[in-house]
């Protein structure tokens, strides 16, 4: 089914900052897949803290890219870019306008900007147009680009949308076939969308310390911080597929949940024992999967085994200093910053684990697309248990 020119409901933001109040509901043409992309009808999208951190300017000036930053590719993009040139010239340097414009609309080279706005079919004009970079989605394939070999119309899939463009807060989105996997009927759309960035991050962190998830390999003592969060709750379950003893930290209200996910020992992070990160049974950690933030090296150091490694998925500038210092001094205890490198074979593996019931998704809350700002606010609040889902 071609969506060419059809309008969809989407949510994005058009400037840095503003939190949930900065999100805007718009109606725009559905994106068109390029040769190696699929168009999907989104059934569920999941939020990650990186989505609102990007809005806060975490990756400034790299992301969001300046003009225009759209959720995937819309019909008539080339027409709009031509129009953009015309209008920008007419308005001068300060007047950056972009019209969300239908393919069939024509704009003459000597048209005035006001006419341009009046004539435009949808009338949206944005300064510094950005989109919420929500990348995790599950849905059904509606169209495939000519080079797409592994998917066909009607397939149920899980996809990581363009990491720099996102586009998950919408009814339709495009995804590269290279970051798309099939979703079996046993895996609900919400669970599929939930596991993309969060479970991939947990998987990569555990793999980086060579924990073998088939249970082979030497016994390892692991600490997982923020084990009630999106990444942490997957990390606990994946770690327990390996030959590990898992200590985990979370808030008091989630102690039982985290134990039920498989943690051997659980610490309430708000107590002095929890803050010390000390294992109640006196284990020294061979590896820490650090999903909380703002923990100094001095808190980890006394709890590590002689070759213990901290995989920090929330690195800040000081993490990189400590990392460099430990390397330069040939320290056997190390702090290693980690950034996700998404791979479809890992996505496929995680979806299969979900299908087999070996990787469960805890869903904190679900919101309709019309209330996406509430989902955004919940994520910013930082107290989700598991994953936050948005459904069109
Ligand atoms: N490096 C990468 O590529 C990468 C990839 C994905 C995520 N991340 C980062 O990893 C972090 C975790 O992501 P997420 O999706 O898991 O976040 P999340 O779901 O928003 O985490 C929220 C959970 O963390 C718990 N928590 C907060 N502070 C804690 C602490 N000091 N000790 C123990 N638990 C604590 C909260 O418990 P309470 O409600 O009880 O406070 C809540 O359940 C974020 O900073 C995210 O940006 C990085």
Image (spheres, grey):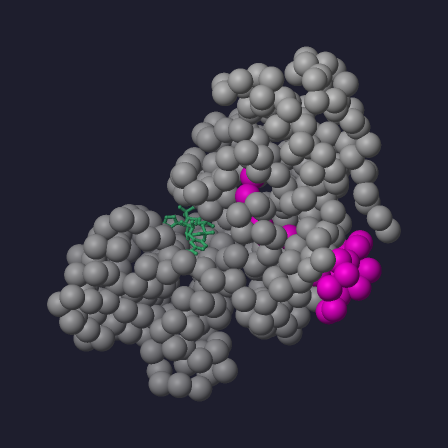
Residue at image x 50%, y 19%?
94
Using the image as rendered, state which of residue 280 and residue 20 is in the foreground.
Answer: 20
Residue at the front extreme, as displayed: 110
Q: Is residue 298 left or right of residue 68?
A: left
On screen, residue 183 above or below 276: below
Using the image as rendered, state which of residue 126 and residue 201 is in the foreground.
Answer: 126
Residue at image x 17%, y 61%?
325
Q: Is residue 199 left or right of residue 61?
A: right
Residue at image x 16%, y 70%?
331
Residue at image x 61%, y 28%?
85
On screen, residue 31 above or below 304: above
Using the image as rendered, state which of residue 32 and residue 152 is in the foreground.
Answer: 32
Q: Is residue 333 magenta?
A: no
Position of the C terminus by quadrant: top right
Q: Image quadrant of residue 116?
A: top right
Q: Is residue 331 left or right of residue 138?
A: left
From the top left corner, tell me how far across and down residue 122 is, in percent.
75, 25
Using the image as rendered, state which of residue 358 and residue 112 is in the foreground.
Answer: 112
Q: Is residue 146 magenta?
A: yes
Residue at the right extreme, as displayed: 1
From the top left corner, tell me how far across and down residue 308 is, in percent.
25, 72
From the top left corner, tell me how far across and down residue 289 is, in percent.
36, 63
Residue 350 is at least partly visible in this image = no
From the top left corner, tell me how far across and down residue 353 is, in percent.
60, 72
Give the magenta part as a residue range. 132-157
């Amino acid at each position: 089914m071609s969506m060419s020119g059809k309008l969809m409901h989407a949510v994005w933001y058009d400037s840095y900052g503003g939190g949930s109040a900065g999100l805007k509901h718009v109606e725009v043409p559905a994106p068109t897949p390029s040769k190696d992309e699929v168009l999907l009808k989104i059934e569920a999208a999941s939020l990650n803290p990186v989505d609102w951190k990007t809005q806060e300017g975490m990756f400034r000036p790299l992301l969001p890219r300046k003009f225009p930053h759209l959720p995937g590719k819309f019909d008539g993009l080339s027409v709009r870019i031509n129009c953009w040139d015309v209008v920008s010239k007419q308005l001068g340097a300060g007047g950056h306008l972009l019209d969300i414009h239908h393919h069939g609309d024509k704009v003459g080279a000597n048209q005035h900007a006001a006419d341009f706005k009046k004539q435009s079919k949808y009338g949206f004009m944005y300064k510094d147009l950005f989109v919420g970079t929500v990348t995790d989605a599950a849905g059904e394939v509606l169209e495939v680009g000519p080079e797409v070999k592994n998917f066909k119309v009607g397939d149920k899939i899980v996809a990581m949308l363009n990491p720099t463009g996102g586009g998950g807060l919408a009814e339709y989105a495009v995804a590269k076939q290279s970051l798309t996997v099939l979703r079996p009927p046993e895996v609900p759309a919400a669970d599929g969308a939930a596991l993309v960035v969060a479970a991939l991050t947990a998987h990569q962190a555990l793999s980086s310390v060579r924990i073998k998830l088939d249970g082979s390999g030497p016994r390892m003592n692991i600490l997982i911080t923020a084990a009630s969060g999106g990444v942490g709750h997957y990390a606990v379950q994946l770690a327990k597929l390996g030959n590990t003893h898992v200590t985990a930290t979370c808030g008091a209200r989630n102690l039982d949940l985290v134990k039920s996910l498989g943690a051997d020992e659980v610490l309430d992070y708000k107590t002095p024992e929890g803050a010390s990160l000390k294992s109640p049974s006196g284990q020294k950690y061979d590896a820490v999967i650090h999903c909380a933030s703002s923990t100094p090296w001095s808190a980890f150091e006394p709890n590590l085994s002689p070759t213990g490694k901290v995989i920090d998925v929330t690195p800040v500038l000081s993490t990189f200093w400590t990392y460099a210092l430990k390397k330069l001094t040939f320290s056997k205890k190390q702090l290693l910053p980690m950034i996700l490198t998404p791979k479809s074979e890992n996505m496929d593996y995680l979806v299969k684990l979900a299908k087999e019931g070996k990787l469960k998704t805890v869903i904190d809350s679900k919101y309709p697309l019309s209330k996406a700002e509430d989902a955004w606010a919940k994520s910013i609040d930082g107290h989700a248990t598991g994953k936050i889902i948005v459904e069109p």
